Image (tube, rainbow, N blue to C red):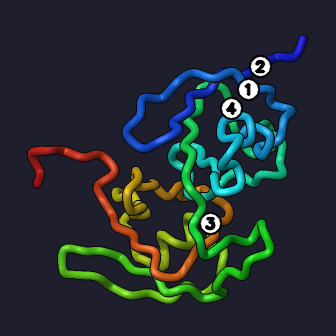
Amino acid sequence: MKELIEVFLIEEPGKAPRPHLLDPEKTVDILIREIFPDRHEEIDIFIEGEGMACDRHHRIHDCGIRRGHRLHFRKRPHHGDSHHGHQIPQHPKLFLDTKEGVKEFTAPKNPMSGKELRDLFGVAADYDLWEKVPGEDDIRIDPSAPAIVLTDCEHFYTAPSELNPGSF
């Protein structure tokens, strides 16, 4: 008998996570097809806390999904990605929202690691870097993420790693 792993699926922003048993040998694409049979081509999976979608061609186990992970499903951006034959910008324009206003940056390469993004924006060690996702939950950029595919005009912001409501 195959050993299944329990994860928690968050199919839409604001919905409660629901437990789900996965066969770790299936591909990410098969999982998406099972959950969204009519819309599977426009959906990506993100492991909570990571900034890059799971590669659809990898087995669930190989892309880092483990027991207890919370998986977010998001509609793919219309400007494409590197996995489906679309061009990604080599040096996308990125924006960092700060107290002083919005600062513009040009990525020196694409994709970039989580650490490289933090370094580009000059994020302090005691702060987290977040990507703004309009209409959905924002994504915390994991400093250990090896490759985050960037698109033009993405907005980011920083927040203290440990929020203290009395400090604001």
User: What's under tag 4, amino acid-wise?
Assistant: Arg
Of 91 and 153, the residue lying toward us? 153
Percent across and percent down for residue 68 are: 59, 26
Q: Is residue 21 left or right of residue 23?
A: left
Label number found at residue 4: 2
Q: Earlier in the sequence, mark 2 or mark 3?
A: 2
Disc 3: which residue: 148
Q: How far separated are the C-alphas under marks 4 and 3?
A: 20 Å
What residue do we see at 73% from left, 26% from top? Answer: 22
Q: How far separated are the C-alphas under marks 3 and 1?
A: 25 Å
User: What's under tag 1, amino acid-wise?
Assistant: Leu
Which element is circle 3 on? loop
Q: Is residue 31 above or below residue 122?
A: above
What residue do we see at 18% from left, 44% from top? Answer: 164
Front disc: 3 or 1 = 1
Q: How far separated are the C-alphas under marks 2 and 3?
A: 28 Å
Q: Residues within 10 Å of mark 1 (few under 14, many from 20)?
A: some
Q: Earlier in the sequence, mark 2 or mark 1?
A: 2
Q: Earlier in the sequence, mark 3 or mark 1?
A: 1
Disc 1: which residue: 22
Q: Is residue 152 left or right of residue 67?
A: left
Of 164 and 17, the residue lying toward us? 17
Of 44 and 109, the residue lying toward us? 44
